[in-house]
Amino acid sequence: MTRNEQKLREVIFSKSDSKVWEEARTEWIIKNIYDGETSCSCGKIPIKKICLLVNTVTKNEAIVGSSCVEKFIGLSIDIIFKDLALIKENTGYIVHLQTVNFAYDNGYINSWESDFYKSILELEFLSIRQKQTGRKINGKIISMLKRFEQ
């Protein structure tokens, strides 16, 4: 275990209810992700792909980088960051299922919007109305994320 991994464990344990690593890990969820520049709870400086974690038991928060999220939670979020960058440039871009699920799980979009988006993921061509609805949903995702970037 590296020094950074040890420091991350210490921070997570100090903010968790459980003192058993596998149990403490399950208390945490990703609350938000955004681009910026800060330091990770593991000590790495700088991180640019920032993940805000929240403990569902203690309500404590921790900021970690995308690589620590992958090690800690076991979730690769690079595709979500890629999708977010692409819809900032092109609101008509269709994001991946992982991004739709993240947006829904974190309350950025409602169940109807999630279901709609999932229904168009595999379509080769979209109607004008489907494109408009997809753009509106993408706008909601981006506007929610911008609140945290400021």
Image (cartoon, rainbow, N blue to C red):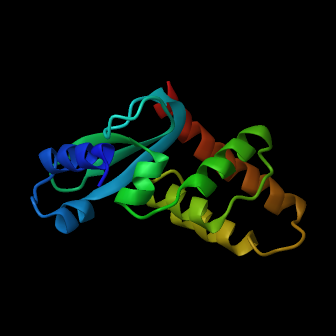
**Residue that appears at 65% across and 46% down:** 84
Q: Which quadrant holds residue 11? A: top left
Q: Which quadrant holds residue 51? A: top left
| 28 or 110, nearer to the observer | 28
**Residue that appears at 62% across and 67% down:** 97
| Residue 51 relative to residue 128: left or right | left
| 83 or 101, nearer to the observer | 83
Image coordinates of residue 15 in percent, x first then y, are: 16, 45
Q: Is residue 46 above or below residue 22?
A: above
Q: Is residue 59 above or below residue 74?
A: above
Image coordinates of residue 48 in percent, x first then y, are: 53, 34
| 53 or 139, nearer to the observer | 53
Looking at the image, which residue sits at the far front?
Answer: 2
- Quadrant where the N terminus sits is bottom left
Label count reads 0
| Residue 20 relative to residue 122: left or right | left
**Residue that appears at 25% across and 65% down:** 26
**Residue that appears at 87% across and 66% down:** 126
Image coordinates of residue 73 in percent, x first then y, are: 37, 61
| 3 or 10, nearer to the observer | 3
Image coordinates of residue 74 in percent, x first then y, are: 41, 64
